[in-house]
Image (cartoon, helix red, strand yellow):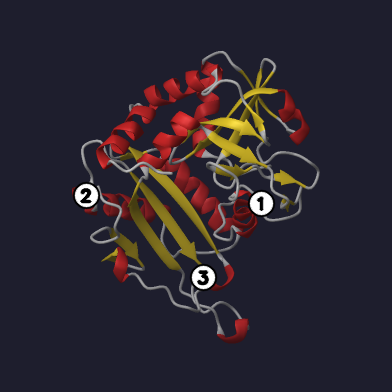
Amino acid sequence: MGDGTDHWITYWNGRFHPDDEVRISPSDRGFVLGDAVYEITRTYRHVPFHLDWHLDRLFAGLRSIDIDPLLTRSQIEALTLDVLDRNRARLGPDGDVLLTHRITRGPNPPLFGGPPAGPPTVIITCRPIHFPLFARFYAEGVALAVPSVRLPAQGGIDPRVKMQSRLAMALASVQVAHQDGHVLPLMVDIEGHVTETSNTNVFAVIGDDLVTPPDGAALEGITLRVVISLARRAGLNVLRRPLRLSELDGASEAFVTGTGSGILPVRSLAGRPLSSLPGPVAGTLTKAFSDHVGVDIVEQARAHDAHSGAHVT
């Protein structure tokens, strides 16, 4: 499964096109203003994982910013599966993909005056997962570093909405990118509470508890929901509560969860190395998650890394 855009098929405003034929208007509000929502669903064994939950979140985001995609949820679900089917020829037996929805309010009126000109722009893409990168992270872990960018504690855009505008996350990523190894920005609000990283939810083992920020403080991750359920089934005491940055000094281990990677161990928190990688809790939950999705996520990434012959540095 190659990484080039040739021959990958995308749905764009009523038709299916090769990726390189998709054109976005320079006046599109998603491009000009970030006035859009998006959603990313991954497959396991070629089957979308909780597409229903992802579409629930997509449509909740559309309602929250008053965008009408002019397509029903059932229509978008059918189009998503059609995009996947049209790209199956590019999937190897052990390959999986990311299905991405991007829905904007459409073209801008002249000089931003009056109501949006519309109609909305609807794009559904299918792209390969970069397994060699994940193989490295499973083995070496990721570091979480605290940028100077702070998020509002309340009153801003609901963090549970997967907004196209990611400027705060982008700036935070730029700030920590100079550090050695792969580093994710650990986002903190103005009151000193941990929220999330630029693209994953955060868990920390503190004493006998597995702690993650509460609903409403960060994006309500799909993988997060599954991992919480698996952790409780394993007898772990999971707490969803405000988590102050200072509390991470007492964390014995940490990990992050996200759509593409599943679970990634954390090797350091704000410059403090963690002793085991993965920690016992992360190791247990990675095994449970792999059993749940029917794929050994670590071995899948390693196999693709070995097959590619390209090691990410």
Quarter where residue 184 is shown: top right
Q: Do the residues labelled 2 and 3 touch (CB within 8 Å)?
A: no
Give the residue pinned by disc 2: 90
Image spot of residue 59 (x, y percent):
50, 53
Circle nearer the N terminus (2, 1): 2
118 shown above or below 43: below
- Which residue is drawn at the image coordinates 26% and 51% (left, top)? 2
- Does 29 sit left or right of 129 as displayed? right
Q: Distance between the residues labelled 2 and 3?
A: 29 Å
Q: Position of residue 281 (x, y in %)?
A: 55, 19
Q: Which one is nearer the viewer's eye here, 206 or 222?
A: 206
Q: Residue furthest right?
A: 191
Q: Answer left or right for 290 relative to 45.
A: right
SS for callout 1:
loop
Q: Residue at x 45, y 31 (%)?
A: 138
Q: Is mark 3 on a helix, strand or loop?
A: helix
Q: Is residue 115 above or below residue 51?
A: below
Q: Tell me, for residue 31, which label it has, or none.
A: 3
Query: Do we see residue 244 in this rendering?
Result: no
- Choose top left, top right, bottom left or bottom right for residue 302: top left
Disc 2 and disc 1: Cα gap in Å? 37 Å
The amino acid marked with disc number 3 is: Phe
Q: Which residue position holds label 1? A: 158
- Give the camera-side residue of 177 and 39: 177
Answer few, some or many: residues within 10 Å of disc 1's Cα (few below 14, many 20 plus, some between 14 and 19): some
Instruction: Using the rendered image of the protein, determine whether residue 32 is visible from the camera's viewpoint.
Output: yes
Residue 8 horizontal/vertical position (percent): 27, 58
Marked residue nearer the N-terminal end (1 or 3): 3
**Mark 3 crowdedness (10 Å alpha carbons): few <14, some 14-19, many ≥20:** some
